Image (cartoon, rainbow, N blue to C red):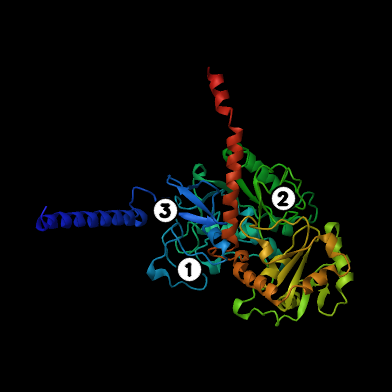
Amino acid sequence: MSEKSMLPSRFLFCLITISMFLLVLSSLFLLQFSDTSFIPNSVFKFILVNGTSVYFKPSGKEEQTEVPIVSSVASLVDGKTPMAREGDCQISNASKKTDALGQGRRKGCDQNQAHLRVYMYDLPPDFHFGLLGWTGKANQTWPNVSNPGRIPSYPGGLNLQHSIEYWLTLDLLSSNTLNVVRPCNAIRVKNSSQADIIFVPFFSSLSYNRHSRLHGKEKVSANKMLQDKLVDFLMGQDEWKKLGGMDHLILAHHPNSMLDARKKLGSAMFVLADFGRYPVEIANVDKDVIAPYKHVLRSNPVAKSATFEGRPILVYFQGAIYRKDGGAIRQELYYLLKDEKDVHFTFGSVRGNGIKGASEGMASSKFCLNIAGDTPSSNRLFDAIVSHCVPVIISDEIELPFEDVLDYSEFCIFVHASDAVKSGFLLNLLRGIKREKWTKMWERLKEIAHHFEYQYPSQQGDAVDMIWGAVSRKISSIQNKLHRKNRYSRSQMLLKRN
């Protein structure tokens, strides 16, 4: 074949090849970014958790082949704040100028793209915001949460440390409020049949703190009456009867909250501070979620966080020293450490300037002791984290929030109680940690501290967002139990029909 006759063929071949390449490229672009694509965007979503890919199936609702997960989890591997991605609230360019409280216009969250769909019972205000003194208009169940500056406030002091139900309830209410900017990982749905979990909005910790004592001629406390009413309400609901409460979420963060009702409601998923006062058949790590306390001390700004040389105190502890049960170790450590020159170990409380003094003390210390008290956990751990003081955890029975996605050994020191009370053991261990090792843990503390912040509106990767993620991951365990329970149920139904 002549040279001239080959030219058109070559030209035609090149043209076809380039056209095919452009067609494939444009198709992929449209499939991934078009809202009207026939293939859901979830096909293209991959999240790396601990080095493994989690694949989202292209279905009406996003499902994972591993475990449900919120967007913040992917960032925990490297400690960086997660970037916005599809499924988060979409903010227009004009509304990105929000005020310090996070207000601004945005599109509503799409419940089909939320990782957790939550149905919340419309309990009377007596169970929630009414406990804060809030009174709405006639037949008004919930306060208006569109203006963060006007929402009912929660009592301060130590009441705040167990205020988790308050923050989660506010977050659910705001998920249907257009002018509140928040992550869209959890969203409230109005139909329980669409929900992954059913939320019980009872401020149980506040009820215990405020209404557990008898007054006047009362024979039953207001706290117990509310629990009894709650049990009667739940037992009468079709949603509870359907699965025996297994898909219900109940918050009981104060160790003494829900004392009268917990046994009857033990099939539900609890959000707790620890398992110290619960029998294993009622609460356990397989079905329940551990949530962080709300820290009482102010957060230490990253830019002002003192370095190794700027923290003259080696070891810091301030709090109740004489405790019962597992907390007896505090007294032993007190007598071991109280006379050491670079150790601050003293009694303290939130009264007077106690909070201010503790804030300054932790921010000036290299290591902060978190010792078991009446229960395995305490707020002191989270005060240390936001103070960027490396926590030393001496509590053999402690359970930690989000430990399935956070490696606490990267920013905490763990010491068995039996070792801690040996003369010289603890100080030799801590003095042996040099500047380089301590600085690495300090840097990690600054990276993860935002995971323990409660705020309204909630933000990507904060404590509220992380709790929803933990709930989402527990749901897979619930589903597994339900599926195993249903192994022979359909067969039995067929036998009965025949």
* Residue at the image point whose x is 67% and y is 75% from the top: 439
Residues at discs 2 and 1 in contact (Cβ within 8 Å) = no
Residue 87 location, quadrant: bottom left
Nearest to the eye among marks 1 and 3: give it. Answer: 3
Q: Is residue 186 left or right of residue 225?
A: left
x and y, in percent, of residue 132 in the image: 64, 61
Mark number displayed over residue 44? 3
Residue placed under numbered mark 1 in the picture: 103
Tag 2: residue type? Answer: Met
x and y, in percent, of residue 170 in the image: 56, 59
x and y, in percent, of residue 435 in the image: 70, 77
* Mark 2 and mark 1: Cα distance apart in space: 35 Å
Tag 3: residue type? Answer: Phe
* Mark 2 and mark 3: Cα distance apart in space: 44 Å
Neighbourhood count class around disc 1 (C-alpha, 10 Å): few under 14, some 14–19, many 20 upward: many
Residue placed under numbered mark 2 in the picture: 258
Residue 7 location, quadrant: bottom left
x and y, in percent, of residue 26 in the image: 29, 56
In the displayed structure, would residue 437 be above or below residue 226? Answer: below
Q: Earlier in the sequence, mark 2 or mark 1?
A: 1
Q: What secondary structure is marked by label 2? A: loop
* Residue at the image point whose x is 17% and y is 56% from the top: 10
Nearest to the eye among marks 2 and 3: give it. Answer: 3
* Mark 1 and mark 3: Cα distance apart in space: 31 Å
Looking at the picture, tell me which residue is in the foreground, 171 or 447: 447
Q: What secondary structure is marked by label 1? A: loop
Tag 1: residue type? Answer: Gln
